Amino acid sequence: MFILYLSKANKSTISPNSLLLCGAAVKSSSNKSVSYILGVGDQTCNTVTYTNRSICALKGSSVDISCIYSHTHPAVSKFWFSPERSHQWQHRSHPEDLRTDSHYAGRVEVIETERGRSTLRIRDLTERDSAEYHFKFKSQSFEWKSSLPGTTLSVTALQVKVSRIISVQQTQTEAELKCQSSCSPAGRLSYVWFRNGQKKTTQQTSAYTDYFNPGDIISCAFSGYEDYRSPSVYPSKLPSVSVSPSGEIVEGSSVTLTCRTHANPAAKNTLYKGNQILPLTPEGIYNFTSISSEDRGIYDCKTEDQLSVSLFIDVQYAPKIPSVSVSPSGELVEGSSVTLTCSSDANPAANYTWYKEDDDSAKASGQNFIITDFRPEHSGSYYCEAQNTRGRRSSTSHHLTVVTGESIIIQNIIRLTLVVLMLTPLLLVILWMSKKKPWSSTAESNELMETMEMQSNHKQDSADGNRK
């Protein structure tokens, strides 16, 4: 539990509709109660305590969601709502009473058997009812903050799954069934199994293993919730999936996968790898002419009524070409530490060995090769080899060069020289431009004076001519 306190602001700075968080307590367990405390100005705080943070309920059943609340002034309105239904509200920022929502019509009621306690009851639960539910009240001077978390309801439906086919005989199928749900109601509940409508008193766990005959109908329920059973299944129509050859499967080999249902009349089956449908022959066979590492995975053989059996195919293959990474990247300063890492996709997982070119002896083993004090003699090209029971592959070489203290000084001198050489032409151009500009101005002035003198002489000659 943690408690958060915030100092109250000056009453004059808070508007009548403002909310002030003056304390909160939340229990760490996700399904325990949570309390929220709100107030306005210096008033006594208003509170809402949700009995449960989360509730799991069975599809078709009823559920009670409760809270305890208190307010300093009489409430003028109070109701339950769900933010997930905001698309049905007239204004998305103004919650509306669940009792006016058509989705809950005839299934919702609010019960207040005692003052300060409100219970929302929802009947005939559907999976669409999975949502978060909030309680809200309003007085003349206060409105409960609707953005605070409420109680989360998860509605689950039980389902019988075929987890394993043990044996298939001429008249019977031995199988292991599982009763599954997305969540569990509160408490450690036992399971109830039904075979042809009769309760199996000896079965109280989620698993049920037995021999099933044609026509057997199986369902399950939580103890105490027998009226909310899973849909029935027919184990005698269970599919089977097998792979040939059995044993280890090696990349490049030919493999046959069989997906069948031993039933009369014959059932139609579909083979899946993830969401991909694989084509079956009329006999329920799928062939890998040359199986690859990408074919490794889980295969599901399903019947028309969605009964499913899974098979994992483990394809073994030699290591792919390894990749090498170096940390730190860039120049390696003398005396520093460097780590080389080798990675390769392989099944079974690969073992790694490190080598230096022109040196036949191994330098290290393991995925990481660490040189703690890098020296000039460590400079060179390194590569790794990945090996498993199916083969071995080597990476490309990665060259490492140490930079000594003298080398760093020389490099800095070279860099400085290059900078000076690059700047020198620019400085020369600037000097040339600065000298050219005054000369150009003087030349232009001389040309202008010569032109004016010539014009003056021409006018004088013209005047002399007229006098004559």
Image (tube, grey):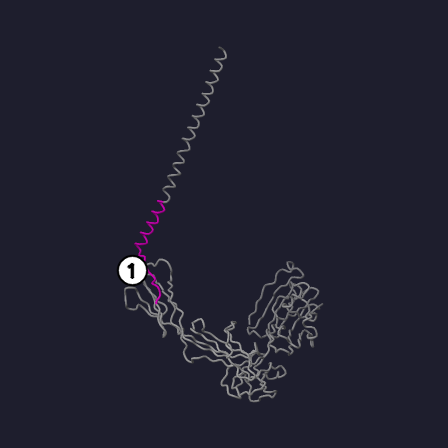
Of all residues shown, which one is farthest toward the top?
Answer: 468
Q: Quadrant of the N terminus?
A: bottom right
Name the secondary structure under disc 1: helix
Is 302 one of the magenta-colored residues?
no
Give the residue drawn at x 30%, y 64%: 357
Residue beneath label 1, please?
A: 376
The vertical placement of 449 against 411, above or below, is: above
- Number of marks in the image? 1
Circle 1 residues within 10 Å: few <14, some 14–19, many ≥20: some
Magenta stretch: residue 416 in it? yes
- Find residue 442 and report its horizontal and vertical position in percent: 42, 28
Query: In the rendered structure, which segment of residues is drawn in magenta?
Result: 394-421
Q: Residue 154: image x %, image y %?
A: 60, 74
Magenta-highlighted stretch: main secondary structure?
helix
- Where is residue 115 drawn, in percent x and y? 69, 74
Tag 1: residue type? Pro
Q: In which quarter of the image is residue 34?
A: bottom right
- Name above or below for residue 169 compared with residue 414: below
With 399 as the anchor, is 311 left or right in this view?
right
**Against 346, is 19 above or below?**
above
Seen at 39% across and 39% down, the residue is 429
Q: Quadrant of residue 23?
A: bottom right
Where in the figure is residue 144, as x and y percent of width and height?
65, 66
| In this rendering, position of residue 289 left or right of residue 215 | left
Camera-nearest residue between 77 and 41: 77
